[in-house]
């Protein structure tokens, strides 16, 4: 059986992203998500920052599954909105979580904001828990919020975000997986985490 790592998420794209990055350091590793394990009570994400929420989810995942667990919390921090939506990114427009509604609300809130003030960054904290061993790493991707949705890849606010660290003007949702992994906030955090947890996973 391959070494299994539990990612406390139902987002299939996040699971695939982690599988790609972690496999570079732990060949043969298998990343499983929430849909692959028995149901358990997921914690309320009520920490004031990304790192706190990531740890809440990772600790709960380890306790419920006994598998080495990775969890992330991430969001979009917009300069003109005093770094909001931040930790509220996924539920910015209220329950239930809905990417399209969140994106429409963000566009409405920035409708009168000029181009030079539309700076933003994605921030991600990734936590790893296996017994008493706990690690948290972070990553950022700087860029700007555009005025219309573009692209069909990614998720969340990717369709509205153009990263600075690229040659063109593609949104995160228009990039191929390899390009996005190389510069994304989550990709950077996972690449920082992977070599640290490889010894724990027996690599």
Image (cartoon, rainbow, N blue to C red):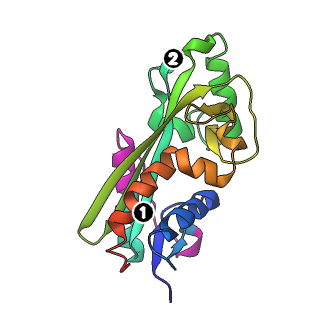
Q: What element carries label 1?
A: strand
Residue 48: % across, % down: 35, 38
Res 80 label: 2
Q: State which tag comes first along the sequence, 2 or 1.
A: 1
Left/right placement of residue 101 relative to residue 45 reads right
Packing grade of label 1 (10 A; few <14, some 14-19, many >=20) is many
Residue 141: % across, % down: 50, 38
Left/right placement of residue 173 relative to residue 55 reads right
Packing grade of label 2 (10 A; few <14, some 14-19, many >=20) is some
The magenta segment is 35-56
What whole-number distance in Å separates the C-alpha atoms at marks 2 and 1? 32 Å
* Residue 59, above or below 158: below
13 or 198, which is in the foreground?
A: 198
Q: Residue at x 57, y 13 (%)?
A: 116
Magenta stretch: includes residue 45: yes
* Residue 121, above or below 152: above
Q: Residue at x 44, y 69 (%)?
A: 25
Q: Residue at x 63, y 61 (%)?
A: 12
Q: Which of the 4 image quadrants contains residue 59?
A: bottom left
């Amino acid at each position: 059986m391959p070494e299994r790592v539990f990612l406390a998420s139902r987002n299939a794209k996040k699971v695939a992203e982690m599988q790609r990055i972690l496999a570079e350091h732990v060949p043969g590793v298998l990343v499983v998500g929430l849909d692959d394990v028995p149901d358990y009570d997921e914690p309320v994400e009520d920490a004031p920052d990304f790192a706190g929420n990531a740890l809440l989810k990772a600790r709960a995942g380890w306790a419920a599954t006994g598998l080495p667990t990775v969890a992330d919390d991430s969001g979009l921090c917009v300069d003109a909105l005093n770094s909001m939506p931040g930790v509220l990114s996924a539920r910015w427009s209220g329950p239930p979580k809905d990417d399209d509604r969140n994106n429409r609300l963000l566009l409405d809130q920035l409708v009168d904001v000029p181009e030079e003030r539309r700076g933003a960054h994605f921030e991600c904290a990734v936590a790893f828990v296996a017994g008493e061993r706990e690690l948290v790493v972070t990553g950022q991707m700087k860029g700007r919020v555009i005025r219309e949705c573009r692209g069909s890849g990614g998720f969340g606010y990717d369709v509205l975000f153009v990263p600075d660290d690229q040659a063109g003007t593609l949104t995160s949702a228009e990039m191929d997986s390899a390009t996005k992994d190389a510069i994304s906030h989550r990709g950077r955090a996972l690449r920082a985490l992977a070599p640290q947890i490889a010894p724990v996973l027996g690599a």
